[in-house]
Amino acid sequence: MPDFPNLETPRLWLRQATEADAEAIFRLFLDPQVTQFHDLDTFTHIDQARAVIERRKKGFESDRGIRWAIALKLQNIPIGSCGFTWDRALDQAEVGFELASKFWRQGIMTEALTAVLSYGFEVKNLERVTAEIMLDNIASRQLLKKLGFQSQEILKKRGFWKGKHHDLEQFVLSKPQP
């Protein structure tokens, strides 16, 4: 199995989350602002964070996807995550992300996703990347458009979490042409 690919940006380390990060990941998903548009319920116990870490580790080991913990270089403590779920048959992936609310609107997710998208297109040779967001998630819509994603369609009742169906807006970014 290949080693987890750590990425670096001017302000950030993008790395694999470990058991030592459980408390930080618990605090991240303890915030209802973070889970508002997420398919996870707001956390109530640290074991939920441990389960997320383990699930993401197994996803990487089985080559279903990759999820980087986002950490500021100075502290190296996770403040969010981003990554892909692969669709190898189509040379594409779906990207997902979340960030602690106190770090919103500071360009952190733009910086992290720029590095992750470059990895996907240049290293994994993806042809396109999709993202699906809840219709009320204005900040994610703005972020995706800033990164060059194009809105494709509204997918009716595409998601089901927190006890109800959700319409999702699908965005697509194609591989940049040389």
Image (cartoon, rainbow, N blue to C red):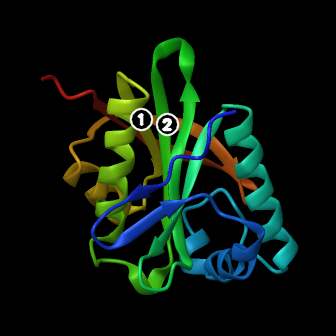
Q: Check the image and report above or below for 60 versus 74.
A: above
Left or right side of 60 for 80? left
The answer to whether any part of residue 122 appears in the image is yes
Query: How far separated are the C-alphas under marks 2 and 1?
Result: 5 Å
Amino acid type at circle 1 is Thr
From this viewpoint, which residue is outermost toward the top? 89
Residue drawn 48% across and 31% down? 93
Residue 92 position, x and y percent, is 45, 24
Mark 1, residue position: 130
Quadrant where the C terminus lies?
Answer: top left
For the residue pair 24 and 139, the one nearer the viewer reads as 24
From this viewpoint, which residue is outermost toward the left? 178
Q: Check the image and report above or below for 178 versus 23.
A: above
Mark 2, residue position: 94
Q: Check the image and report above or below for 41 versus 172.
A: below
Q: Residues within 10 Å of mark 2 (few under 14, many from 20)?
A: some
Element carrying mark 1: strand
Residue 137 position, x and y percent, is 42, 61
Marks 2,1: beta carbons within 8 A: yes
Quadrant where the N terminus lies?
Answer: top right
Left or right side of 164 for 153? left
